[in-house]
Amino acid sequence: MECIFCSVIKNNTPHHEIVWEDDKHLAFLDSNPVTANHTLVIPKKHTADILNLSKEEYGDLMVASREVALKIKQETQCHKVSILVEGLSVPHVHVHLVPLDVGQDLIKFVRKNISQ
Ligand SMILES: [Zn+2]
């Protein structure tokens, strides 16, 4: 069975709202958002574990994630954008960018979900 994120890269199936793209990365809205505008940034090359990326690929992913996070912050006027790599759901490297308002704490969301 094909990786769901590789399918999104190929033909956006299942459909996701793509918010940013360059030649090596794709950013789209998370289908199960923690907060509004929760976005995922993925490398177009399939890799299951972020530690399998080369140093250059890892750096490129973080630079792309920073660019998308700045765009989110500018467009949503949120307090901060949390950046998280957890690797627990889809086996294709993805960086979560979660806009947070004052007082919101992403780790509380994560702990709640992990303990369920
Ligand atoms: Zn994949």
Image (cartoon, rainbow, N blue to C red):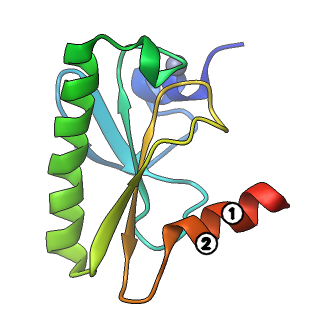
Question: Mark 1: few, some, or many residues within 10 Å (few <14, many ≥20)?
Answer: few
Q: Residue at x 62, y 32 (%)?
A: 90
The secondary element bearing badge 2 is classed as helix
Q: In the picture shown, does residue 114 fall above or below 48?
A: below
Splitting the image into 4 quarters, where does residue 41 fall? top left
Q: Are marks 2 and 1 in contact (CB under 8 Å)?
A: yes
- Where is residue 50 shown, x and y percent of the image? 44, 23
- In the picture shown, does residue 112 fall above or below 55? below
Label 1 CB-ligand 1 distance < 8 A = no
Q: Residues within 10 Å of mark 2 (few under 14, many from 20)?
A: few
Q: Give the farthest residue toward the bottom.
A: 103
Identified at 36% across, 89% down, the residue is 102
Q: Position of residue 78 (x, y in %)?
A: 27, 80
Choose top left, top right, bottom left or bottom right for residue 62.
top left
Q: Position of residue 44 (x, y in %)?
A: 35, 20
Give the alpha-carbon distance from disc 2 to disc 1, as whole Å. 5 Å
Q: Which amino acid lies under the numbered mark 2 shown in the image of this protein? A: Lys
Quadrant placement of the N terminus:
top right
Identify the residue shown where x is 66% and y is 38%. Answer: 88
For residue 34, above or below residue 67? below
Residue drawn 51% across the image and 68% down it: 106
Relative to the observer, which residue lies in front, 27 or 62?
62
Task: Please tell me which residue lies in front, 51 or 70.
Answer: 51
Q: Mark 2 sits on what residue?
A: 108
Q: Which residue is mark 1?
A: 111
In the depicted structure, whether residue 106 falls above or below residue 51 = below
Determine the secondary structure under disc 1.
helix
The type of residue carrying mark 1 is: Arg
Q: Position of residue 91 (x, y in %)?
A: 61, 25
